[in-house]
Amino acid sequence: MPRLALLVEYDGRPFLGWQRQGNGQSVQAVLEEALFRFSGERIGVVGAGRTDTGVHATGQVAHLDLEREVDPGRLRAALNHYLRPQPVAVTEVRRVDERFHARFSAIGRAYRYRILTRRAPPTFDRGLVWHHPVPLDPEHMHDAAQVLIGYHDFSSFRATSCQARSPLKSLDLLHIHRDGEIVIVDVRARSFLHHQVRNIVGTLALIGSGKHPCGWMKDVLAARDRRLAGPTAPADGLTLVEVAYPSWSSRSSS
Amino acid sequence: MPRLALLVEYDGRPFLGWQRQGNGQSVQAVLEEALFRFSGERIGVVGAGRTDTGVHATGQVAHLDLEREVDPGRLRAALNHYLRPQPVAVTEVRRVDERFHARFSAIGRAYRYRILTRRAPPTFDRGLVWHHPVPLDPEHMHDAAQVLIGYHDFSSFRATSCQARSPLKSLDLLHIHRDGEIVIVDVRARSFLHHQVRNIVGTLALIGSGKHPCGWMKDVLAARDRRLAGPTAPADGLTLVEVAYPSWSSRSSS
């Protein structure tokens, strides 16, 4: 039974997240419906990252098993046809080994968080950025963030709903820079706790706006107490940009 | 009577263009309605560029006259408040001389045209790019385009509906480059004929996809015949990014 990996891009605005839910539209359900219309079979897809409600992806990966061989290019075209008019696109289909698992084979995940720092509200990017009318200093944010790199107890940045067995995680990269009116937070790790990126961004924003000094981040991390960190930044600004596997990654060429 | 210039950004998807129309929503009408809700007066706004249906702007400029002095920051905040939920934002308000005219004082206009060149359809950028599933060679397009720089008769790229007295225009810049899956066409002139940019882009796409050689552009220009050029590229990909005046321009910092 051939196993295939899909590289998936989606605008998360209309979805209750990746995972199939009882009470609304999910990216997984939309993909499974397109697969059903293509194959006439009920085929499940397994995603690498279970993005939350309103979170976007340019580099999500999912795997599935087909009954028979299908040309990857033909499957991509058919899925994109049946996905219309949903804002979900299969950018690539790859034949993978039957031991490949989108979630468990992944060795790294990268997210990008975008913050629009101007008084005027967003137009094109509404729902795709966090609108933060107060100016932020990306250099302060970057400096403050470096204390989080490495293996730590991230309890201060963990959602109460988090299902992970341990709050210990290894953070590989946290880079903040400005691109015009947008402050961009790039973050990379093997895996993340629930809301970890959004809680880190919400905390960094308090440093970038001058409400707390750079050194505050060290105290927040050491406290291992969610109540001491900043608020959870909105889902709008968050995009899953890459899932990495031992020999390839899903980062798009754009 | 104080004259003010507004720097305006809009997502053109829901609009029949800049200009007030009898039969649908226009950016001008939406701005004038926000001004009315702020001031209680019917105040007209004059735009620098009359963008077509579905065309976007990050650097549109409009002027208006108020009955009394208003702090520019306060006016910007009030207009953005009353513009909700329309995808139109006033990014800046500037006090200008009473001889300033958004359209007639302009000495240059810059547009950016974006073409998504991949098989998969757009997700985030639907209506904001031209989806061109066939690959394009931006270097060929750039080379071919250079014959259009300078003062020429642009009849081959002029819409039949064009109201301009003369087809003679001076094109100052035409630069094509790739940014990942997007091919970007940047163009600048004092002013443009109706559909001139979209007709040039439609013609360049035939060269970029290999249907015509680079040298074909010279023949099309020389023919001064609209029927010889390529089709009009869709409005989706077009954005007015800058209007230049003798001492300032509207280009956003992003």
Image: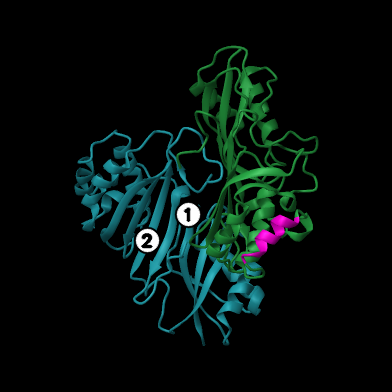
Chain colours: A green, B cyan
Q: Does residue A247 lie above or below B168 as drawn?
A: above
Helix, strand or loop at label 2? It is strand
The answer to whether any part of residue B25 appears in the image is no
Sort mark 1 into few (<14), some (14-19) or many (20+) by Cα contacts within 10 Å: many
Residue B99 placement (x, y as % from top left):
40, 83
Task: Confirm whether residue B241 shows in the render.
Answer: yes
Kindly identify which numbered label has been placed on residue B110.
Answer: 2
User: What chain is tagged by disc 2?
Assistant: B
Image location (x, y in percent) of residue B160: 35, 51
Question: Label 2 sits on what residue type?
Answer: Ala
> Residue B79's quadrant in the figure?
bottom right
Stretch in magenta: A214-223
- Residue B238 colored in magenta in the image: no
Q: Which element is circle 1 on?
A: loop
Q: Which residue is mark 1?
A: B55
Three-letter code for the amino acid on which mark 1 is drawn:
Val
Provide residue B47's location: percent of width, then percent of height. 46, 69
A247 w.r.t. B14: above or below? above
Which chain's residue wears label 1? B
Residue drawn at x 55%, y 66% is: A137
Query: How far apart in space, not on screen, are marks 2 and 1 (Cα)?
Result: 13 Å
Report the quarter where the N terminus of chain A lies: top right
Quadrant of the rendered image containing residue A194: top right
